[in-house]
Amino acid sequence: MDFKNLLFEVKESIATVTINRPDKLNALNHDTMRELKELFTSLKNDDSINVVIVTGAGEKAFVAGADISELNKLEGATGKDFAEAGQSVFNLIENLGKPVIAAVNGFALGGGCELAMACHIRLASQKAKFGQPEVNLGIIPGYGGTQRLPRLINTGRAMEYLLTGDMIDAD
């Protein structure tokens, strides 16, 4: 499989998926989401893969969220379709049927934080920063973060992060 925005490697039944847009802090655009869906659909049915690691290229970001340049162009129904497409990809990852590990170095914000939450295990470097800053844009997390975050941490803390947009570090 050839991808424009993803690197894919398999060693000893461990697949590594690298979101490869470091110049954009690995922001998720339409093409990247389409590629993730295609790749994870294939991985779901591949019995030679036992575990999947997801990471981001470069030192600054795992995934710094959705590509804002694309978000600014969305209106009404297209925004809803964009969110539903992201939810579909992250639900696929969450229900892959094999462990998916997020290896987080740098920013995991918005859609990037939601991607990490969709994974079964999150490993974070000392440089990792997690957050749901969508509130600062006047929107809500669109890829399932409002449902996943309260399941991973308590509801009160989840509401604090979702309503303030504050970031937390790996500690």
Image: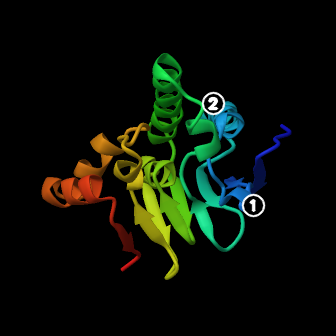
Which numbered tag is attached to residue 41?
2
Do we see residue 12 in this rendering? Answer: no
- Location of the N terminus by quadrant is top right
User: Could you tell me the amino acid type at mark 2?
Assistant: Thr
> Decide: marks 2, 1 in contact (CB < 8 A)?
no
Q: Residue furthest right?
A: 2
- In the rendering, at what x and y percent does residue 166 appear? 33, 65
- Could you tell me which residue is drawn at 19 percent across and 61 percent down? 157
Q: Which residue is mark 1?
A: 23
Residue positioned 42% across, 65% down in the render = 130
Q: Nearer the viewer, residue 133 or 90?
A: 133
Q: Residue reaching furthest top? A: 77
Q: Residues within 10 Å of mark 2 (few under 14, many from 20)?
A: some
Horizontally, residue 134 falls left or right of residue 96, namely left
- Which badge, 2 or 1, comes first in the chain's sequence? 1
Counting from the top left corner in percent of width and height, residue 125 is at 52, 78
Residue 154 percent location from the top left of the image: 17, 57
Q: Position of residue 101 (x, y in %)?
A: 52, 57
What colour-coding does the image apply? rainbow
* Quadrant including the C terminus: bottom left
